[in-house]
């Protein structure tokens, strides 16, 4: 069969397009936490919207911070993140505002409230990945997946390994220490605490303590002050605002730890995100709970 030069050129172009599409779908076996197929693009995305503070931190750690063109109002670390345009809330985000910045990748937290936003973004042709970040193990999974999407798994592995080395060091140091019981104050009205479905419960255990509300299966749960008193924790963990609320409210006197002023003030900027600062969070908690044990 005889082909003219122009026909050959067209055929070559078509083959290249098909090959490109095949490479683009190289991640077709991967699914995000909404069950949607994850697309690994041929070239690393250059216009990224990260609507999850944890993934924003990871993007910066991997070296892709300059590619971010949108974040949530809660993304405060690293300092460079504050210069990324604020697109509002990461839960039920403004889809029109997200589409308005023309992203080639959007990363969402896989909350039930974000399903509709994920569907609309995908329907608009935007590569969208929805991920849960509820456990320490989710950090490694998320970091390596983002590294793969960015075509930089080596950098992602370095970040992952660095964090896990610190977590391992804390775990080893806490072997054999007595584990005091703790109540972690998250919110005051209604009163909310940490359950076993949260990385914060895992951090408590790693740092040498026991969460008195481990029987709550989800990440958090609403409880009563009377029940906190009944469980009688050795210490109360709280952020600066929460600690002040406990100290200034006489109703908390029914809790022995509050009455005895055994309230440990934690840095919520460090301990409240299952991301790049997980190791730092474990060190901080372990140092507060067991002064002098970590060398």
Image (tube, helix red, strand yellow):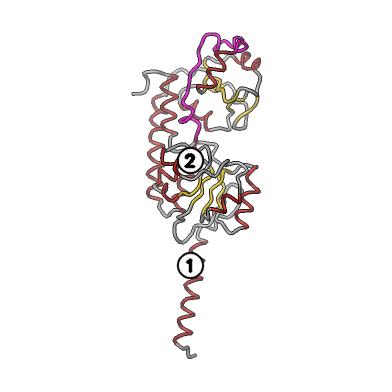
Q: Is the C terminus in the top left, top right, bottom left or bottom right quadrant?
A: top left
Q: Position of residue 230 (x, y in %)?
A: 63, 14
Q: Position of residue 59 (x, y in %)?
A: 44, 46
**158 to the left or right of 26:** left
The residues bearing labels 2 and 1 have C-alpha atoms spaced at a distance of: 30 Å
Q: Are marks 2 and 1 in contact (CB under 8 Å)?
A: no
Identify the mark at residue 59; answer none if there is no mark. none
Residue beneath disc 1? 20
Identify the mark at residue 139; answer none if there is no mark. 2
Q: Which tag, 2 or 1, sits closer to the chain's start?
A: 1
Quadrant in the rendering for residue 224: top right
State the residue at coordinates (50%, 60%): 26
In this rendered view, identify the residue nearer to me: 59 or 12. 59
In this rendered view, identify the residue nearer to me: 271 or 26. 271
State the residue at coordinates (65%, 25%): 222
Q: Residues within 10 Å of mark 2 (few under 14, many from 20)?
A: many
| Highlighted range, magenta | 249-273
In this rendered view, identify the residue nearer to me: 242 or 223. 242
Question: How many numbered circles are shown?
Answer: 2
Badge 2 element: helix
Residue lying farthest to the bottom in this orientation: 2
**79 to the left or right of 218:** left
State the residue at coordinates (56%, 22%): 185
Badge 1 element: helix
Is 199 covered by the magenta stretch?
no
Q: Position of residue 203 (x, y in %)?
A: 49, 29
Q: Residues within 10 Å of mark 1 (few under 14, many from 20)?
A: some
Is 265 covered by the magenta stretch?
yes
Q: Position of residue 114 (x, y in %)?
A: 62, 45
State the residue at coordinates (49%, 90%): 1
């Amino acid at each position: 069969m005889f082909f003219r030069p122009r026909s050959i050129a067209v055929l070559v172009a078509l083959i290249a397009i098909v090959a490109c599409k095949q490479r683009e779908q190289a991640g077709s076996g991967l699914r995000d936490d909404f069950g949607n197929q994850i697309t690994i693009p041929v070239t690393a995305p250059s216009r990224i919207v990260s609507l999850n503070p944890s993934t924003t931190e990871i993007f910066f750690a991997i070296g892709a911070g300059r590619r971010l063109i949108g974040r949530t109002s809660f993304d405060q670390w690293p300092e460079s993140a504050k210069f990324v345009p604020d697109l509002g809330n990461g839960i039920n985000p403004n889809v029109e505002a997200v589409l308005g910045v023309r992203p080639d990748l959007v990363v969402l937290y896989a909350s039930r409230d974000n399903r509709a936003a994920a569907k609309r973004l995908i329907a608009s042709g935007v590569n969208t990945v929805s991920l849960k970040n509820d456990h320490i193990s989710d950090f490694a999974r998320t970091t390596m997946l983002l590294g793969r999407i960015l075509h930089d798994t080596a950098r992602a592995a370095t970040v992952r390994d660095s964090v896990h080395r610190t977590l391992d060091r804390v775990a080893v140091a806490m072997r054999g220490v007595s584990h005091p019981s703790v109540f972690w104050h998250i919110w005051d009205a209604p009163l909310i605490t940490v359950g076993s479905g949260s990385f914060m419960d895992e951090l408590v255990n790693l740092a040498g303590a026991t969460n008195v509300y481990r029987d709550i299966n989800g990440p958090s749960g609403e409880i009563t002050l009377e029940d906190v008193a009944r469980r009688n924790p050795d210490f109360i963990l709280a952020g600066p605002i929460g600690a002040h609320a406990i100290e200034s409210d006489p109703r908390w006197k029914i809790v022995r730890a509050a009455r005895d002023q055994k309230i440990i003030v934690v840095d919520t900027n460090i301990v409240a995100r299952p991301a790049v600062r997980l190791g730092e969070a474990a060190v901080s908690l372990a140092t507060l709970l067991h002064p002098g044990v970590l060398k």
